Amino acid sequence: MTAPWRRKLGLLLLGLGILAPVAALAIPFLGLPPALSAAATGAMLVGAPEVLLILSTVFLGKEGMQQALGRVLTALKAPAGPTRYFLCLVAMAVSSLLPWILYGYLPDRMPADLTFQTRFFAISDLLFATAFVLAGSEFWAKLARLLTWTEPES
């Protein structure tokens, strides 16, 4: 069993490693020079997650890492209740259709500010991805059945 400070530090590094690519979405909005912004975004997307996950493995050890990742995967694979399932479907529909309708069919309702549009589309994409992950194992099974070809029975 690892020391409590090692476990806490390992879990913190694991969380930072998982959230680093999400944090990279905010870097272009910080007003940094373009070269620095590009370098920081690249580091947050490519280098930081790997380094942080390796460091978390060093502090947690093999058993601690398997236990932490097992809890995360168990939570993601857990079946969603009817309320969570419905809310995820609504979030996926709204985050998909609202930008398409506003930008494609009602462009005069969409603000002309490019920064607003970029943030709007980024938030919409993030909402869709989050709802997709949280929809639960039944949703993923239905999607797999939908996308898998089966020969019709004669």
Image (cartoon, rainbow, N blue to C red):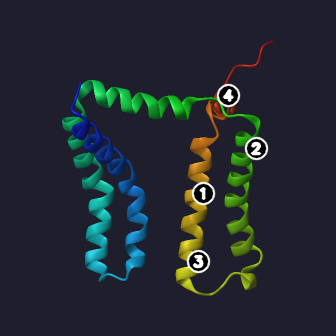
Q: Are marks 4 and 3 in contact (CB under 8 Å)?
A: no
> Could you say which disc has been placed on residue 127 in the image?
1
The location of residue 22, given as percent across then percent down, is 43, 58
Q: Mark 2 or 3 closer to N-term? A: 2
Q: Are marks 4 and 2 in contact (CB under 8 Å)?
A: no
Q: Mark 1 or 2 closer to N-term? A: 2
Q: Are marks 1 and 3 in contact (CB under 8 Å)?
A: no
Q: Mark 1 or 3 closer to N-term? A: 3
Q: Looking at the rendering, which quadrant does residue 151 occupy?
A: top right
User: Which mark lies nearer to you, 1 or 4?
Assistant: 1
Q: Is residue 1 left or right of residue 124?
A: left
Q: Label 2: which residue?
A: 86
What whole-number distance in Å separates the C-alpha atoms at marks 1 and 4?
Answer: 24 Å
What whole-number distance in Å separates the C-alpha atoms at marks 1 and 2?
Answer: 14 Å
Q: Mark 4 or 3 closer to N-term? A: 3
Residue at the outermost top position: 154
The location of residue 135, given as percent across then percent down, is 64, 40
Residue at the outermost front position: 4
> Could you say which disc has been placed on residue 145 in the image?
4
